[in-house]
Amino acid sequence: MSEAGPRLGGRRHSDERSSPQRSLGQRKPARTITIDGEHAGRRLDKFLRSQFKGVPAGLLFRLLRQGKLRVNGRKAQQNHRLQEGDVIDVPELHVDTAAAPRPAVPSTLLDQLRGAVLHEDDDLLIIDKPAGAAVHRGTDVSAGVIEALQHLRPELPELELSHRLDRGTSGVLALAKTPSMLRYLHGLLRDRKHEIERHYLAVVAGRWPADMDIVDAPLRREEDGVVVAGDGQSAETRVSVKRRIGNRATVVDVRLVTGRKHQIRVHLSHAGHPIAGDDRYGGRAFNRRVTGLGGPGIYLHAAKLVIPKPDGADLVVTAPMPRRWKALLNSDL
């Protein structure tokens, strides 16, 4: 390993050596990568995709299958778990840059995220995600939060989402700066004993019963959404009343015990109190009234995240209630 490998985002990265550049159009130079402790334990395919973001994943996987991209001089499977000291030999890669242009990030999203940081340290970047922003690019989204942050923070090339929020949901969103922190957070999300606490605020239709503090109903994904079903995955949500809005709505504090897709939205609707502005699981008449009084969009906000850090301390990050909620909260629904 060389004395000083490249530094990315202020951290030592895997040691990387490149052969002299060849003038062959868009070919990239052959290189050798030595895995350091930060990347030990990662799957080979995920590591390669993170390092060669301009290269189609299909090309990387084909090179693995053909044995042209090797680990420690041997052919490797894409699910191979890397170990510290592993040496990856990467051949010259033919990259058609015109076929994979960098996603265009809307200027409005960039402006929203410049002042959205709630917490930052060596391992984490935690932001207040604006409502209406997708967390990543998709079929109808040219660029989401992760692409925008990669544009704003090029010194953090390994920045990754640790969890997701629905497009319409605002609030606390955590991103890992390093692969080791990403693995740590994913482990916490799977661990019921040392879990990340995720608290939300929601405005729901009707008067939520003060004595109904748990919704425990299994969920199953279907083509047109998520439904409560006996053969679904276990799902538990804890709910407490924060305040009443007249006689027609309630602001509730919601804590996710499990983290299924659309869990809060489906559970609250299943309990007979759908979230205001929820165009999939909510009520049309109530949503029309809410839109007229407080504006469009779902009234669901990730208000607090409590992360047990590796040193034993809890990191508590909160996001203030969105300003657009004030008109609705001050109304007489």
Image: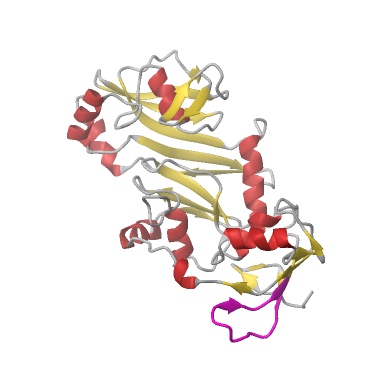
Which residue is at a point 62% across and 50% down the rendered structure image?
Answer: 182
Instruction: Report whether 144 appears left or right of 88.
Output: left
Location of residue 286 (image quadrant): top left
Towards the viewer: 148 or 25: 25
Residue 188 in magenta stretch: no
Which residue is at a point 17% across and 33% down the rendered structure image?
Answer: 292
Towards the viewer: 172 or 291: 291
Can residue 85 be spotted in the picture? no
Expressed as whole percent of the image width and height from the top left, the position of residue 128 reads: 42, 49
Query: Magenta stretch?
Result: 16-32
Expressed as whole percent of the image width and height from the top left, the position of residue 271 reads: 41, 17
Expressed as whole percent of the image width and height from the top left, the position of residue 227 reads: 45, 23
Expressed as whole percent of the image width and height from the top left, the position of residue 315 reads: 57, 45
Which residue is at a point 61% across and 62% down the rendered structure image?
Answer: 59
Quadrant of the drawing holding the N terminus: bottom right
Which residue is at a point 59% across and 77% down the rendered structure image?
Answer: 27
Quadrant of the drawing holding the C terminus: top left
Location of residue 16 (image quadrant): bottom right
Q: Is residue 318 above or below residue 178?
A: above
